[in-house]
Image (cartoon, helix red, strand yellow):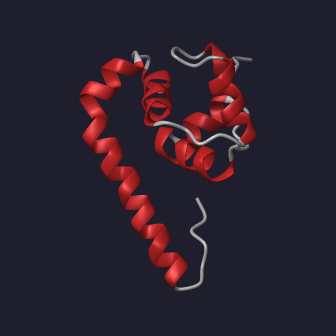
Amino acid sequence: MQRLRDLPGLGPKSEQMLMDAGIESVARLRELGAVIAYIHIRRHGQVKPSLNLLYALVGALEGEHWLTIAKQQKADLIMQLEGFDQLEKLFAAEGEPLNL
């Protein structure tokens, strides 16, 4: 079974952040996708992740180096995160959690 740290661009620290957020397998990471996994880490992890982790997660899933992802997809990924943040605020205003 492939470990999270075996994915390109991820190491022991990234793996620990994912596991702290309840993402314990490559299959689960693939199922959630990079953006949702990053949001889980941000919500449940013990360390606040940088955007470089988001780029690394995308790169790991796409087999690309995180710097390539940062250059090519940075604006789109940030807009996705901002969209989730706004959606979360709307749900909170209604008194409901946004379950991802």
Q: Where does the image place residue 67, in percent across and percent down from the top left?
A: 35, 19
* Picture quadrant of residue 96: bottom right
Q: Where does the image place residue 47, in percent across and percent down from the top left?
A: 65, 40
**What quarter of the picture does the N terminus occupy?**
top right
Q: Where does the image place residue 80, in percent across and percent down from the top left?
A: 36, 51
- Please determine whether, in this image, residue 73 is positioned above or below residue 68: below
**What quarter of the picture does the C terminus occupy?**
bottom right
- Please determine whether, in this image, residue 45 is positioned above or below residue 96: above
* Picture quadrant of residue 98: bottom right
Q: Residue at horizontal 51%, vertical 16%?
A: 9
Q: Residue at horizontal 55%, vertical 38%?
A: 49
Q: Left of 56 or right of it: where is 19?
A: right
* Picture quadrant of residue 63: top left
Q: Residue at horizontal 73%, vertical 43%?
A: 22
Q: Where does the image place residue 36, in percent across and percent down from the top left?
A: 52, 48
Please count the marks in the image. 0
Q: Residue furthest bottom?
A: 94
Q: Left of 83 or right of it: where is 8?
A: right
Q: Nearer the viewer, residue 29 or 79?
A: 79
Q: Left of 61 or right of it: where is 23?
A: right
Q: Nearer the viewer, residue 87 or 2?
A: 87
